[in-house]
Amino acid sequence: MQRITRIICDHHHPEKMSLFDQYNSLLALLKPYLTERTFSIFAIARLIDDNQYIGWYTPLEGQPILLSEISDQSHKAKIENTLQNRINDIEAVVKLMSLTAEQQAFISSWLPRIKSLGNHIYVINDEPVIVNTFEDPILPAPAPVIPPKSFWRWWHFLLLALLLLGLLGILWYFFCPYAKEKPAIAEVEPAITQPVAEKKPDPVVELPKEEQPVVKSEPEPIPEPAPKNCITREEIANNTDKPKMVMIFDNSASMTLTLMESQASINQYLRADWYSMTEQEADAYEKRMTRLPNRLSSSKKVALSTIDKIQPDVNIALVTLSACPAAQTTSFYHYENRGKLKTKISRLNPLENNSATPLYSGIKQASKMLDGVNHDDYILVISDGEDNCTKANICALASKIANEQPRLKINIVDIAGQHKIDCVANKTGGKVYIAQSPTQIVEQMNNAVSNMNISKPICE
């Protein structure tokens, strides 16, 4: 733990001392729910030197420099982006925390102080650290709103213009030369003229029908219709080539791991020596590493909202990975029955015993439920790891699917970012989306469905 800086502690301002105590309470409230990296943006405040100074400390190692002293603008922008992402993660976690009304109000009152432009931002090995000034928060000024000009502020100009036009009309009426009396025109007797012989039209000579010229008119080009970003109800009703989708959902015990710890901390937890701990220590450690938001809770929440975005003409089935030796499947749910599908997903919970990830079985069964030859079909895998039920080669299975069902695409949302089943997506023309935080899960799940081209809204 190294000291970043110190500031004079002004005991004559009880408000600042109160904020100092609140700040430490805030960190104690947030720390159990944040990853070490996200929590590292908070400098630790301590009273030092007989309470004459507040020392600001950090567990990060390296030379601290002020963000404002970085001259490289691209480097500076990168640090600012990292800081904003960390703050976004904190706000996302706060929304998922189980808080009392008082705690919620307390954290909400401190969020503007965390984001205040008046804070001192230090950078240690490209990691931003906030040193709070305990001053009133300074937030970015909102864009100025230009009020529309009221009609009653310029009505007098309109009235003046109308009066001038009226005056000009009167002057024109009395003084315009065209208004003077026109001179009388002498009557002229009409001259007697000789009638002119009417000229007869030239006779029309009709050509034989076979000799008449044929005039061909060029047909006007028919403009191609612009591509639509929506689907009509008529298209849904008349579409006989409807795609289908199978959602493979990992329901194993590893999905209960929290999203608020680094991968290094999770690896340490998975290798933990439980026999060296007391029962109380083991329980506390397990609660910390499975606290909300965890992989399963966030994935279920996003999956439920994702289902609502899929076109009504796409039928969806669910394959769950809960235990060896095989995955569990459901029948296809039509649009009217998607509520039952969402209820089934919301009730997913890992088994206490024999929890595992039969991913090979899940992908094999899902592929058999789909056509993938005569029309496009899709599989969406939501998982945090690889198969631990069989040693069968899942990449070879993906190659077989690609050869036999060339129009079957498999997209993967990788919750742990381990890249252990990338070959399944690569061989079937799909993509892998890495999601290791609540914000990323929402974004990457939306990307995975958008890539399938089955999320067009109904044209209104």
Image (spheres, helix red, strand yellow):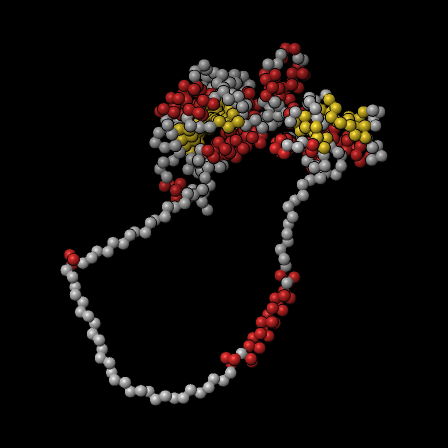
- Residue at position x 38%, y 21% in the image: 400
- Residue at position x 22%, y 79% in the image: 197
Tell me residue 384's x, y (percent).
53, 23
Q: Relative to 82, is 325 on the left or the right?
A: left
Quarter holding residue 217: bottom left
- Residue at position x 43%, y 19% in the image: 395
33 up-or-down from 188: above or below: above
The one nearer the camera, 277 or 178, is 178
The one nearer the camera, 269 or 87, is 87
Q: Relative to 24, is 442 on the left or the right?
A: left
Tell me residue 299's x, y (percent).
54, 28
Where is the N terminus found, in terms of image quarters? top right
Quarter holding residue 374: top left
Tell me residue 190's x, y (percent).
33, 87
Q: How many marks?
A: 0
Q: Can residue 137 be seen in this view?
A: yes
Q: Relative to 353, is 187 on the left or the right?
A: left
Quarter holding residue 44: top right
Q: Can residue 332 be seen in this view?
A: no
Farthest residue, direction top: 275
- Residue at position x 68%, y 16% in the image: 280
Tell me residue 135's x, y (percent).
76, 37
The one nearer the camera, 315 or 122, is 122
The one nearer the camera, 153 or 200, is 200
